[in-house]
Image (cartoon, grey):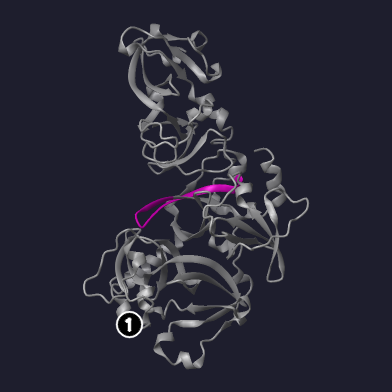
């Protein structure tokens, strides 16, 4: 206890309450006090884990002290002081440091700061109401006279955190280099007779672009800066990582809607960022539906009668799917902007010039691309090179006897058996669906001969992340550390996003996963 007494006989404390109980932490152990930001849930953590927050460039786990104490009304993920149970806007986050890792403690209310005389600090065994395990206490502040004389239990944050996160900060040697994880080869590299396509929707019609042409997919910003005297399909400009990105509305470019592109006006939909000889261009679409691997023999050339027309100059072919019942035009990123209104689509692109091309090439060397999907209200990412395709969930799945509980069954994909992994069960997330009216998606990943389909709630797009926004994930459990080793914190279209990056090789090791999850 002597460690918490200053030489002058007083010590400063942060006083706070949790469930009506008065608690305290030494002031010099608290790095920061702030309103709770929006939290991102991370799976396979202890019950007391509220989620992850990002502060000053660091990602930190947040422990809910209500959860630790088993109190009702635990939890806050609404952000900016809102709580799930609507109790109070007085909730605060106390940031402390544990073994070099910042950790947030979520409390109901901060009462204030207090300088406490030595004679009011007692051993935890003499606390008036030691309702917390004595091992988690460093002492007690005895009640005194006046308003500043309220009693409180002094928390010992070290044992409290270690009891919740036995593995926090314990990263084995050599595992810090997360980029060293094996990157499966793309199907295009392994098999030259298939094309990998991103399927987009425009005015409820499907179009496709080669994955290699799509640098990333980001949300449409709330506001778009209009360009004076521009052609109707040139919607304006947006900022993407401190660079100007011209936006082209495919609705208008293809003549599918006579009104202005409603998607861009209302801040909905997606922007597919294409890399062209003239620089980067963003095309506004309603949604990114799937990523498909299509045998080249199923991509037919444009019929000669249509190929003679300038309107079809931007098409590389037509993909025949589902036995010919589904036809998807495959667009050329290079020739797309010659469509219809022609060279007017280049307005604003030349402003980037060859300097823009150089900047894009330099960025490509320092960035990674990820396929991002949604699951239980959070976003997860997998390296583009690990993802073979993204499909709609099948109507029927064949159960697999004696399989781990997270394997839903098997289906067939082009004549081959594909095991389906229910990510919600694997990550111990509550059952259910984010969008009840949609069957969700299957993200097909592969490494060598191993292949599996991951059942997810929906696609969020393709995101390219510079190295500077990717960092290690806090280790809240060994199972989580095996599956989620990195986190990307990006801002796109004015939206702040935290994306949990999964290791595809670990997802394919079913036996090891089953053994690891048995300890969670």
Question: Badge 1: how crowded within 10 Å, few (<14), some, or many (20+)?
Answer: some
Specify start and end residues of the magenta stretch as a single range.
Answer: 482-497
Whether residue 184 appears in magenta in the rendering, the answer is no
Taking depth in this image into account, of 345 and 325 the one nearest to the observer is 325
Secondary element type, mark 1: loop
Say which residue label 1 marks.
341
Whether residue 485 appears in magenta in the rendering, the answer is yes
Taking depth in this image into account, of 506 and 90 the one nearest to the observer is 90
Estimate the x, y position of residue 230 in percent, counting from the top left: 25, 75
Estimate the x, y position of residue 110 in percent, counting from the top left: 36, 25
Residue furthest to the right: 401
Q: Residue at x 55, y 18 (%)?
A: 133
Whether 45 is drawn above or below 416: the answer is above
Residue 211 in view (yes/no): no
Whether 304 is drawn above or below 450: the answer is below
Q: Residue at x 67, y 42 (%)?
A: 517
Where, by quadrant of the figure, is residue 441 drawn? Answer: bottom right
Residue 231 in view (yes/no): yes
The quarter in which the C terminus is drawn is top right
């Amino acid at each position: 206890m002597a460690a918490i007494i200053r030489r002058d006989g007083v010590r400063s404390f942060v006083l706070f309450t949790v469930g009506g109980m008065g608690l305290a932490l030494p002031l010099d152990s608290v790095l920061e006090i702030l309103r709770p930001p929006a939290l991102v849930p991370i799976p396979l953590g202890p019950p007391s884990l509220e989620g992850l927050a990002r502060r000053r460039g660091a990602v930190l786990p947040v422990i809910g002290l209500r959860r630790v104490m088993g109190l009702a009304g635990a939890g806050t993920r609404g952000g900016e002081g809102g709580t799930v149970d609507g109790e109070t806007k007085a909730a605060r986050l106390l940031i402390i440091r544990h073994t070099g890792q910042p950790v947030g403690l979520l409390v109901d209310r901060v009462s204030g700061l207090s300088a406490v005389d030595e004679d009011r600090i007692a051993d935890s065994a003499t606390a008036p109401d030691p309702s917390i395990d004595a091992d988690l206490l460093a002492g007690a502040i005895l009640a005194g006279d006046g308003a500043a004389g309220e009693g409180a239990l002094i928390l010992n944050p070290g044992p409290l955190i270690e009891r919740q996160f036995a593995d926090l900060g314990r990263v084995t040697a050599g595992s810090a280099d997360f980029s060293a994880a094996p990157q499966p080869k793309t199907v295009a590299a392994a098999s030259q007779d298939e094309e990998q396509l991103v399927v987009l929707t425009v005015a409820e019609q499907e179009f496709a672009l080669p994955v290699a042409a799509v640098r990333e997919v980001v949300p449409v910003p709330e506001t778009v800066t209009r360009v004076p005297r521009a052609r109707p399909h040139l919607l304006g400009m947006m900022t993407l990582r401190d660079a100007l990105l011209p936006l082209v509305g495919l609705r208008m470019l293809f003549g599918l809607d006579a009104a202005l592109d409603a998607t861009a006006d209302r801040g909905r939909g997606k922007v597919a960022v294409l890399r062209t000889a003239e620089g980067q261009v963003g095309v506004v679409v309603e949604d990114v539906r799937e990523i498909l691997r299509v045998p080249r023999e199923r991509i037919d050339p444009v019929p000669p009668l249509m190929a003679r027309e300038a309107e079809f100059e931007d098409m590389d072919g037509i993909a025949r799917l589902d036995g010919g019942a589904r036809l998807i035009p495959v667009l050329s990123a290079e020739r797309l902007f010659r469509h219809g209104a022609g060279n007017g689509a280049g307005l604003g692109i030349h402003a980037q010039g060859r300097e823009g091309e150089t900047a894009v090439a330099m960025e490509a060397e320092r960035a990674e691309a990820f396929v991002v999907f949604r699951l239980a209200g959070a976003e997860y990412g997998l390296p583009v090179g690990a993802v073979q395709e993204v499909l709609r969930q099948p109507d029927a799945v064949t159960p697999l006897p004696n399989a781990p509980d997270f394997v839903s069954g098997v289906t067939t994909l082009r004549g081959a058996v594909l095991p389906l992994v229910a990510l919600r069960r694997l990550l111990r997330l509550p059952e259910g669906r984010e969008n009840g009216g949609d069957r969700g998606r299957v993200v097909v990943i592969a490494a060598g001969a191993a292949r599996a389909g991951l059942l997810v709630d929906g696609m969020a797009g393709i995101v390219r992340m510079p190295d500077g926004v990717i960092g290690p994930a806090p280790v809240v459990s060994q199972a989580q550390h095996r599956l989620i080793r990195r986190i990307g914190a990006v801002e796109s279209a004015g939206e702040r996003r935290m994306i949990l990056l999964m290791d595809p090789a670990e997802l394919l090791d079913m036996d090891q996963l089953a053994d690891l999850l048995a300890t969670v």
